[in-house]
Image (cartoon, helix red, strand yellow):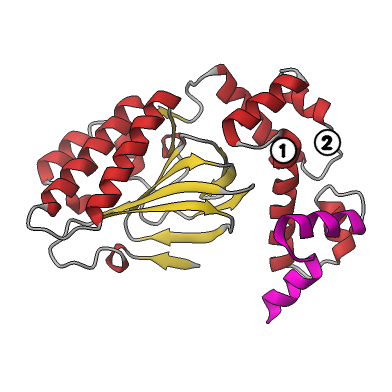
Amino acid sequence: MKHYSIKNYVKNEGAPPVWVEHVKRRTRPEEAHTHDCMEIMYIRSGAACCYINNRHYPVLRGDFYVFAPGDTHEFSISGNLSHDTLLFSPDILGKEEQEILLKNAVFKHWCTPGDLKEKKLSFPLAAAAELDTMFDELAEECQKNTSYSGMLRKAQFIRLLLFALDKGTPEGLSGTHNDLQLSALFNFISEHYHEDLSLLRLARVANVSVNYLNEFMQRTIGQGPIEYLTRYRIEQARRILENSRDTISQIALDTGFYDASHFIRVFKQCTGITPGQYRKMLRQ
């Protein structure tokens, strides 16, 4: 398993231990890994599935994930994903600042390795727009190396942290009705993707009409329910191709495709190569 260190990112001597990277239109999944620091992953657009210590979370615009040092996490992607990754060491905060923040139950759970619902926050669209700007400003400051950039970097980081703690909603506590419907749908797909799932069945799970589900998902994540389901199936197929010797026909059946030819055709449409070519590439 990969293990990342913040020293690989913050290389300027004396710079505050915080770093932001903005990733646009990511298509490859991230394998299971850990860090020696805290990590925040903030979702700008797209759809994916995140796994924190083997717990599954559907990823949506405005989601905010926090990983403590030692937390095992990975994510698969359904389509293009745009996100910000923020790495920081708690040492960036002074002793008094840490004591104040640790009185906040959410921040305390952030710092604790394990499967805790506070590891995921969700934000309304208005708050997400403000977070976009804060991440942009902090990422820009992380690239500078002036006599006062360290102070600005720390100030912007604390501002972002406090905003998230004030405006974010932990997973499972509350949220808009539509967000909860979509979250339930994503969880259903993750558990039943190998079955024959029609658009009507997906709409019933979300408790909305077919037209509303199509319109809402297009507006929220940029793809309809069938496209999301198809891409989710392809991601699961890729994981099986990478970790097993199952036949193409068996993988097709295990991931919800009609037959091997249907699976091969859709896999090539999504990845540009056939499942056999993908497996051969992995071996090479």
The reply to whether dot 2 and dot 1 touch (C-beta < 8 Å) is: yes
Residue 203: where, in percent of width, then height? 75, 24
Is residue 31 found inside the magenta-colored segment of the image?
Answer: no
The residue beneath circle 1 is 189
What mark, if any, has residue 197 been given in the picture? Answer: 2
Task: Look at label 1 and name its amino acid.
Answer: Ile
Is any atom of residue 260 visible in this view? yes
Does dot 1 land on a helix, a strand or a loop?
helix
Majority secondary structure of magenta residues: helix
Is residue 282 found inside the magenta-colored segment of the image?
Answer: yes
Q: In this view, does 219 lie to the left or right of 170?
A: right
Which of the pair 86/172 is nearer the observer? 86
Q: Is residue 189 left or right of residue 17?
A: right
Query: Which comes sooner in the sequence, label 2 or label 1?
Result: 1
Give the residue drawn at x 84%, y 41%: 195
Residue 215: where, in percent of width, then height? 67, 25
Q: Is residue 261 left or right of residue 23?
A: right
Q: How crowded is mark 2: few (under 14 residues within 10 Å), some or many (20 or more)?
A: some
The segment highlighted magenta reads 261-284
Vertical position of residue 144 compared to residue 244: above or below: above
Residue 162: where, in percent of width, then height? 25, 33
Task: Look at label 2 and name its amino acid.
Answer: Leu
Q: Residues within 10 Å of mark 1 (few under 14, many from 20)?
A: many
Q: Quadrant of residue 281?
A: bottom right
